[in-house]
Image (spheres, grey):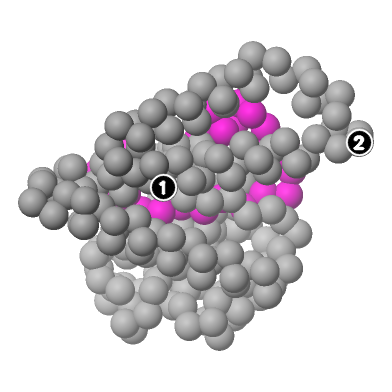
Amino acid sequence: MAADSGTKPGKVKNGRPLILFVDDNDVLRNIISEVLERAGYSVICADSGKSCLKTLTEIYPDLILLDIMMEPMDGYETLLAIRKSPACKDIPIVTLTGKIFLPSEMIEYGKEISGWIKKPIRMEPFIEMVQQIFAELEEDKRVALEMAENGSIQEQYNIAMHRRRHRVLNRIYEGILNQCITPEKEICSAWGEDTKMMQQIISEEEEWCRAHGLL
C-alpha cells in the first residue's frame, strides 16, 4: 500500500491512530493491515526498510510496527536510520521478530523501541498488545505533563521517555530469560557479560526514575 500523499507529517489519517506496518511478507502485510483496520486503526504498509524510510518523508505515524528479519536492509538497520532523522526520532517503534531476542540486541536497541512482539502472530493477543502499547504511551504523556506541569517540553519528554524505557527494558529482559528453555539454556548460560550489561542498563533506568519520583 503506498503512502497517502495527502497525509503530511504531524497529521493523523482519518482521525484514527495511524500505524505504519513494515514487513517484507506480502501475505502478512495484507492480513495485519486488515486486522488493524477492523480494530479501529488506520494503516500504511511498507514492504522494506527503504520503503519505510521513503514513507516517513510523507507521513508521520503514531506507531511503527517493524519486522526485524528483512532483506537487504533488516529491521535494526531501519530502526537506526529512522532515529537519525530529527523528525522521526520520537515515533514509537515496536519490533516484530520470530527469532530469539539476544542480549546484545537489547543492549544496542532496547532504548530505542516501545515494545517487542514475538512471531508467529496470534491476532487477538496481537491486537491487545497494540492497544496496551498505545494506552501505556498515553499514560507516559499524562504522567509527564502532571509531574512537569510547569517545566519545559524537554523535561516532560525526559520523564515520558525514561518511564517508557524502564517498562520496556524490564519486559525485554524478562522475555529474554523466558526464552531460556531447552535447547536454549546452554546459549543463555554463555551470555555472561551481556547479561550483566542488561542488568546494568535496567539499573541505570531505575536510578533515574527513582531520582525523579517515578518509582
Residue 170, quarter of the rendered image: top right
Q: Is residue 116 left or right of residue 187?
A: left
Dot 2: element: loop
Q: In the rendered view, would you say 183 is above or below 52?
A: above
Q: In the rendered view, would you say 165 is above or below 144?
A: above
Q: Earlier in the sequence, mark 2 or mark 1?
A: 1
Q: Which residue is mark 1?
A: 164
Q: Is residue 152 left or right of residue 168?
A: left
Residue sitting at x 61%, y 26%? 104
Q: Nearer the viewer, residue 26 or 80?
A: 80
- Range drawn in magenta: 82-109
Q: Which residue is mark 2?
A: 182
| Residue at far top of view | 193
Q: Amino acid at mark 2?
A: Thr
Residue sitting at x 8%, y 51%? 150
Q: Is residue 193 left or right of residue 178?
A: left
Dot 1: element: helix
Q: Is residue 54 visible?
A: no
